[in-house]
Amino acid sequence: MNQVYALVDGNSFFASCERVFRPDLRYRPIIVLSNNDGCVVARSKEAKKLGIKMGQPFFQIEEFCIQNKVSVFSSNYELYGDLSGRMMTAIASLSAGLEVYSIDEAFANFSGLQEAGVNLTNLGFQIKNRVMQWVGIPTCVGIAPTKTLAKYCNHLAKKYPGLKGVCNWLPLNSNQRKKALACQPISEVWGVGRRYEKRLNALGIETVLQLAQADPATIENQFNIVLARTVRELRGENCIDFEELHPKRKQILRSRSFGAMVGSKEELAGAICFHAEEAVRTVRREGSCAHVVGIVLNTNRFRKQDPQYHVYPAIGLERGADDPTTIIQAAMYLLNQYYRPGYAYKRAGVYLSELSPKKLEPLDLFVEERWERNELLANTVDRINAHFGKYTVVHAASLLHKEAWQMKRDRVSPQYTTCFADLPRVS
């Protein structure tokens, strides 16, 4: 059976999420800001036309945004995460399998469907229409026999309006494929970008077609095996496996910069506990467990006049864990060991590593009773939060001094889909 993938990607995802419950913004330029409203991380096509750049500090363009009636939003992670889940559900309903690659894109498994008589281009449009109907997010779809080509076709679907948002590689003849590869620079290839662009250009490789025609052995010798694999994928040779649902993670990191500088251990404890709970939610949702817990403590590198302190300590667990109690206890132990007074901290977080499937975790007679108790508590909290809302029951420590360490989000939109208090009202 020949492998076929569809890369489905939400267009200007964060900005599109802001439009779902605000039809008045349909044709308005929109930008979304990073943590603490620092710089631009998402732009609608109207904002792009105005010349607003990704990563541009907001203070530099604040007056420009007012003059050009640009709608400006703080990052609403709760809304984006929920709409992402709904988008993935819509995609999965029309595909044989799904690999969630990021918050706004996923690989759908189309393998075997063409042999069964399914028109894959039509199926791409069905997915595009269903996501719009069910969720309200515009998407583009790239269909190809390898993940790298599917990602490239998705780029073409975005760039050329005549494709109407769906680009299928399979029906193209040899000349059409060469033209499709020759029309874009190598920076548009998944995994290449600016990192290798200059070095490849120096070798006379400037277009995607030239990269596809390069010798994989030479590329591996001069660069690495990963880039050589990209060349083979551009030729239609499948080198990257499809992973059902989520690709295998090696680590989960949850951290945020603070809205203001934080000094006390109690304030840091609140942030550490909050991020530990967020990391555990991801682990439990994906059916994994962590064998290593670490924390992040950073001062502000840009304040050269301040004393600096940056640590990333970790501790191994006696067995893999996915319950908040165990993870938080380990994180608090590390905070007590590595906290240093007299520093102005700008960022804190938690990371979980050495992840493995929970179902493969061996039983341990001597710790099983305590683990069962923690698991029972975690399951109970999960059920309550699933029924009444995400933060109905939390560890008390995650509320410590929240006003001191929480992010600055002065322009955040309502959490329309996850908070009853933010539901739209019709008068």
Image: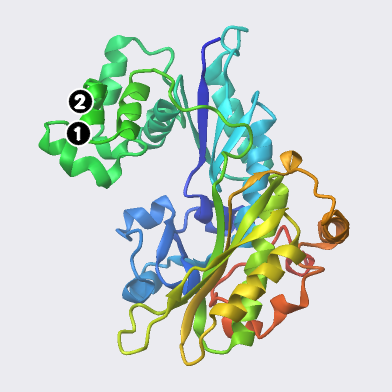
Question: For the residue marked with disc 1, what is the amino acid?
Answer: Gln
Rate crowding at label 2 as few (under 14), some (14 to 19) or many (20 or more) other CA atoms within 10 Å. few
Near-viewer residue (355 or 94): 355
In the rendered image, residue 154, in percent from the top left (x then y), is placed at 43, 32
Relative horizontal placement of residue 20, taking residue 62 as reference (left or right): right
Near-viewer residue (377 or 6): 377
In the rendered image, residue 173, in percent from the top left (x then y), is placed at 34, 9
What is the distance, in whole Å, between disc 1 and disc 2 at their CAs?
6 Å
Near-viewer residue (405 or 170): 405
Question: For the residue marked with disc 2, what is the amino acid?
Answer: Thr
- Compared with 235, 391 (above or below) is below
Q: Which residue is mark 1?
A: 222
Outermost residue, front direction? Answer: 366
Relative horizontal placement of residue 128, taking residue 386 as reference (left or right): left
Q: In which quadrant of the rendered view does residue 216 lie?
A: top left
Q: Are marks 1 and 2 in contact (CB under 8 Å)?
A: yes
- Compared with 220, 296 (above or below) is below
Q: In which quadrant of the rendered view does residue 1 lie?
A: top right
What is the tally of numbered marks visible in this picture? 2
In the rendered image, residue 365, in percent from the top left (x then y), is placed at 85, 50
At mark 1, the secondary structure is helix
- The quarter of the picture where the C terminus appears is bottom right
Residue positioned 57% across, 40% down in the render: 248
Relative horizontal placement of residue 317, taking residue 191 as reference (left or right): right
Residue positioned 38% across, 18% down in the render: 236
Residue positioned 69% across, 38% down in the render: 89
Q: Tell me if residue 27 can be seen.
A: yes
Q: Which residue is mark 2?
A: 218
Relative horizontal placement of residue 204, taking residue 7 as reference (left or right): left
In the rendered image, residue 159, in percent from the top left (x then y), is placed at 36, 36
Numbered badge on residue 121? none
- Compared with 353, 72 (above or below) is below
